[in-house]
Each structure stands twice: as structure tokens, then as C-alpha cells.
Image (tube, grey):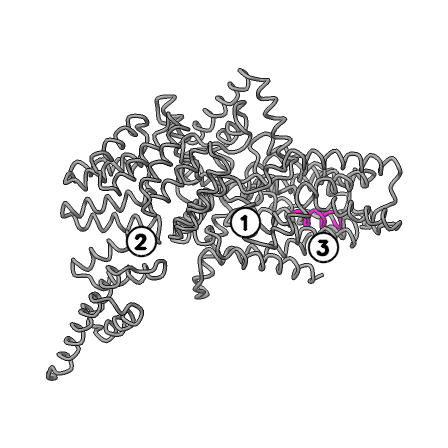
Amino acid sequence: MFGIFFIALAARMMSLHQIRDLGFMNHTISDGRVYEDCARAIASGQWACPREFVHAPLYAYFLAGLRFLAATKGIVADVLLIPRVTQLVLGAFSCLLLFRAMSRWFSARVGLVAALMLALYPPAIFFDLLIQKTSLGMFLVVALLGAMTLWRERPTVTRAILCGLLTGLLIHVQQTLLLATPIVPAFLWLGRRAPQTPQVPPRRVGKAAFGIAGAAAIALVLAPWVIRNRVVIGEWVLTTPNLGQNFAMGNDPSGRGTYQSLRLGRGSGEYEQREWTRAAERALGRSLSPSEVSDYYFDQAVERIRENPDGWAKLLARKVLMTLGAAEWMDAEDYYVYTEYSSVLRWLDRFFHFGVLLPLATIGVFLTIHRVRELWPLHLWVLATGMTLVVFVVFGRYRFPMIPVLIVFAAVGVLQLFAHLLRLRPSGVPKPSKHQMDAGFTAAIVLALVANLGSAKDRSASATGLANHAAALAATERLAEALRDARRAVTVDASSADAWLILADIQRRSGQLDEALASIDRAAALAPAEAAPRRARATVLIDAGRLDQAESFYRKALEMDDRDSLARAGLAGVLARTSRAIEAIPMFEQALAEEPEMVDGRVNYGNALLELGRADDAAAAYRAALAHDPRHEEAMINLAILEFNRGRPAEALEQLDALARHHKPGPPAQMLRLSALARLGRIDDAREDARALLDREPDRDDVRRMLRALDVAAARATSRPAP
């Protein structure tokens, strides 16, 4: 039994080792960044999460809990490695739970095969590796199946409550699963007990009591977040106030059925809610609450459906095919980028993906159709979770809650195939009739064709996935690798304006300014109505020292879109650099009020304040930037310089030590550290650091001069007479 656990854990640990060089390992994006920021806020005492947090909340508390445990145990490790390792263990434990549950619901052989399939299902390994809620959701789905199995064997109110509690927690991981919620109370009310178990409970407890207990437990778990929403955002909202946005994205007759952003370059999880809100408020001409924003987009989606019912019907058909397809539709991190780094994922994906799982599960469903009165909750679970994709948007992670159940039926199908080939009778699966066999194999062949023929072109790294990975690599200063993936992205899809802008930014950071301007021209041609290419051009022009032209393009960007806070902050930065800091300050403040997490804007705001002699306000701006991004290099350096210059070497040294934990310090930071140590009277430490620098870089004349000065200071301290 524990062999299953170790097989699953080994596959996951090997994959984790193989993706160690992946850009996402040290830099989260989109929803992962949102959850990381929220977990940091919770761990620092903001228990209710920030007001702007509109995601399913449980995963944020999961991450915060891991941070708290690591801190209390004195564990010093990468804050992104701890949750990944924890998720790998939970993923392996899920395989063990599935074995225990399905051995009782079907047979030990079915349970064993199902557990091994989940252990080696490559998308399951992939989701366990992400800083994303899907892994926790899979564990809760399998735990729910286990709780339902316990209730079947011995129905009690306590076990019914356990089923309800797990369902409520699952909703807090993926709110679209509200569509599947009624299945659990219905199962507890109408479900059949396992045939070998005694009649429990006594007659005085009606069957409805189980359903009521389960529903009450679900409500109990949801209640705290409902209260939080009332207190924090001022509205009674059951889960998260973005149902309308998700419905609108997935039901636009002119859309693709998957994620789409409102503005170029603003589709990431950090920005999307703000963009949806601004667009709705502009359309209605007034401020809106989160629920009013959701209602606006829901009404807009319904209106578009009424205007184009044929287009909507075609979109629904497309989403059904996408749901049944073999491809793993990405959100922010692309499964197929991960397979390029992990041979474990790559080889498993060749033989075992959704296009293989679905036909096998179909065979299993037909072979167990005689047990429909027992298995209907499993059938409904697959249909309901599939419906969440068709009703909302298609993501691989939205499809994942159905995977454990499909794997169980696929295990039945695998056993039957082996039995058919070897002319054996599989244990735990009654011999099927010829009609069952014919129907099952026919349906499996049809679904195999549907799943695989249309999805072959989508089973490779996408332009968006490559561009996102390039951005993550660039964020960790791996510019050569970032350029490689960004160029691949525009090769895969030359019509992606987002990919061209990401390539342009990396080219700018690499000093390839002419190439960056050419890439921006491509993006502007693809998105002529968007402000983002103008803003990007202004950023490149700043690096080229052409500040007048940069100012002009920032102003053009704001003329095209006066909501563009990045353009406003960029323009303020140009004003500050051209001796107009007084004019820049209100523009910075407006931009930061609109977009508080704009870290670069906060740093430039601090620089402008410092130019005006407002040192305390500048320090506060730098610290605010670090509160949003504790690894921001420029914020740490600027704050260290500021603190040193105003006679606080200890505070300066604290920032320099933090800088060294996340970045390789450059010469200015190295020299400042030596000066701070000397100012604190730690002459010997400063001399030791200076010698170490010279050992690594013997041509550093600045360090050599500093070491001579430190030697003189040390000699004076030694020769000074004692008082």
C-alpha cells in the first residue's frame, strides 16, 4: 500500500529536481503572485485578506499557514520551495487515499490501478509543482471521495458532516464547483449504502437527516468568508464577487472560450479585477461595488448572447470539444513548457494524457452501468465539473476536479482490456455482456478521436506560455534565456501583441534598444488602439536618453487611455528626471492610488521625494515598494543609501543583507556595505569582506583603496591608548 505513496512521491520529487532551472521556480506570476502576496499579508497579521483579493481564499491561508509553521520551527528555506514540497507530499498521499476509497467502492485491484494511474498522471504531477490552488483542490476531491466511501460503509451524521465540511473547503479552493455542490447532500440523502454493511442508523434517524447535516456543514464552512465579505467589501457575497466576469469571458460569441483580458498587457491576476472594475465604472459613469461589477458583466454577457445566439451556440460546441480534448489549456503557466524541462513529465505525457484517460474511463463507465444506482454520484460529479468549463471558461485546472473520478473508471477499463486480451476475468468487475462491451468500445473509440484529432496542434508550448516564462526568467536576471523563449513565442504566434511586447522589454533590458523598438512596432501594428505599445516605446526611449521623445509617447499613451496608471507613473518619472519633481509628485500619487502594487512607480516616487528633500517620505515610499515586492533590488539599494546618508548605518546594513539574500550585489552595494560596517565600528568585518572581494575581483581599485583606509583605521584603533 505504501509503495503507491513512494512511487507517486518519487515521480514528483524527480520532476521537481528536473525543473529546478525553470524561471517560475523563483518568480510567481498572475494568480500565483496574488496568492503569494495575500499569504504574506495574512502572515503579517492581515487575517481577512486585502479588500482587492477576489480569488478563492483557502489556498492563500494554506500558504500563510506554511509560512507560519516554517517560522515557528526556525526553518530557513525558499518560501516557494516549502509549499511545492508540501504539495508533492499531499499529491502522493492523495494516491494512497484514492486506493483506500476505491478498494472499498469497487475492488482492491481497481483501487490499486487507480492509485497508480493518479501517481503517474503527468498533469497531476504538474499541478503539484505549481504555486497554485489546483493541487490542494485535488487532495480535497480525493478526501471527499474517501469520506463518501466511509459514509457508504457506515452512515452516521458525523460522517455526513465530514462530507459537507470537505465540500465547503473545496468550494473555497475553486468557486465554480458550487455547480457540483448539490451532489453531496443528494448523495447523503438518496445514496445507497455498501451492500456488505449493516443497517445504520436506527430508524429514528431519517435519511433526510444525513443530507441536512451535509448541507449544514457546507454552509458552516462558507459562512466565515461570507462574513468577511460583508465586513471587508461591504456586501453579502457567498464566495467571490467575480462570477459575472468569468461568465462574460467564457460566453462572448466572438471569444475563444478561454481566458481573455480587457487590455493589452493587463491580463495577469494582479491587474484583472481592477481592469474589469474600471471598464464597468467608465461604462456606467459611477463607482461600483464588487457585486455591481459582477452583475454588469453578467448582464453584458447575456445581452451579447441574445444578440448572437448562433455564435454563442458555436462557442459552446467549441468549449465542449476543448473540455474533451487531450490538450491541457493553460492559465498562466504552460504545462507544455514544464514538459520541456522535465523528462518525467515529457515521457509520461507521450503515453498517458487526457486523450488516453477519457476513452479508458468511458469503457469503465459502460462496464459498470449496472451499478448506476450506487455510482450515480460519481457520474454526476464528472458531468457537473465538466459543466463548469462549458458554463464559464476552459482551463486545464478547471477540468482537474473530475480527474480522480475519471481515473477510477479508467482503472476499470484498463483491467477489462487486460482481461479481454489475456482472456481473464478481472477481479471486482463482473463479466460484461456483449452489448456492454460493444457499446463501451464504440463510445471509447469515438471519444478517442474527438479528444486527440482536434487537439494535436495544441499539445505543445504556446506563445503565451513561452512569453510568460520569458518574463519570469527576465525577472530573475536570466536575460539570455529569456530572449530565447521570447523569440520562440513570437515564432509560434507572430500575431500575439503581448508576446512582442514581452520580447521588446527583454531586448531593452539586454541593451538591444533598436531591436526593442522594432518589436514594439510589430505590437503596435497588431494592436493599434492600445496604449501599451506607446508606453513601451517611451520606456525604451528613456534608456536611450531621449527623454523629450519619451515624454511625448507617455502623453500619447494617456491620450489613448487615461486609465493607464503605468503611463502616468512613467510620465511622472520623466518629469522628475528633468527637474520637474514638484509637477511629478501629484502624478505619482494619482498613479499609485489607482495601482498600489506598482513597485517601480513607488521607487521612482521615492526618488522624486528625495530630490525635494523629503527624506522621511522617500524612505516610506521605498519601504512601501518592498512591502509589495520584498526582493526589489532598486528599492533595497536606494533605501540603504538613504539610511546611510542620514546616519543610520545599521538600517542600511539590514537592507544590504536583504539584498545579498536575493541578488548578487553590484559594486555600489558592495562599497556601501564596507562603509556601513566601518561606520558601525566593525572594522575587522569590513577588512575581511574587502579582502574577500579582492580575492574574487583582484582588479577592483576602489576596494583596494577602501582596504587601505580600513587598515589605517584599524591601526589607529590599536595604537590608541586605553582611557
Chief SS of the magenta region:
helix
Residue 161 pos. (x, y %) = 64, 46
Q: Are marks 1 and 2 in contact (CB under 8 Å)?
A: no
Identify the amino acid type marked 1.
Answer: Tyr
- Of tags 3 and 1, the one toward the viewer is 1
Q: Pick the residue in front: 551 or 6.
A: 551
Residue 520 pos. (x, y %) = 36, 35
Q: Pick the residue in front: 561 or 101.
A: 561
Q: Quadrant of the C terminus?
A: bottom left
Identify the amino acid type marked 3.
Answer: Arg
Q: Which residues are magenta?
A: 143-154
Residue 538 pos. (x, y %) = 28, 36
Q: Which residue is mark 2?
A: 633
Q: Are marks 2 and 3 in contact (CB under 8 Å)?
A: no
User: In the figure, 311 relative to 449: above or below?
Assistant: above
What residue do we see at 66% from left, 45% from top? 353
What residue do we see at 62% from left, 49% from top? 122
Label at residue 338? 1
Q: Secondary structure at mark 2?
A: helix
Mark sitting earlier along the chain (2/3): 3
User: In the figure, 193 relative to 698: above or below?
Assistant: above
Residue 486 pos. (x, y %) = 44, 43
Q: Which residue is mark 3?
A: 100
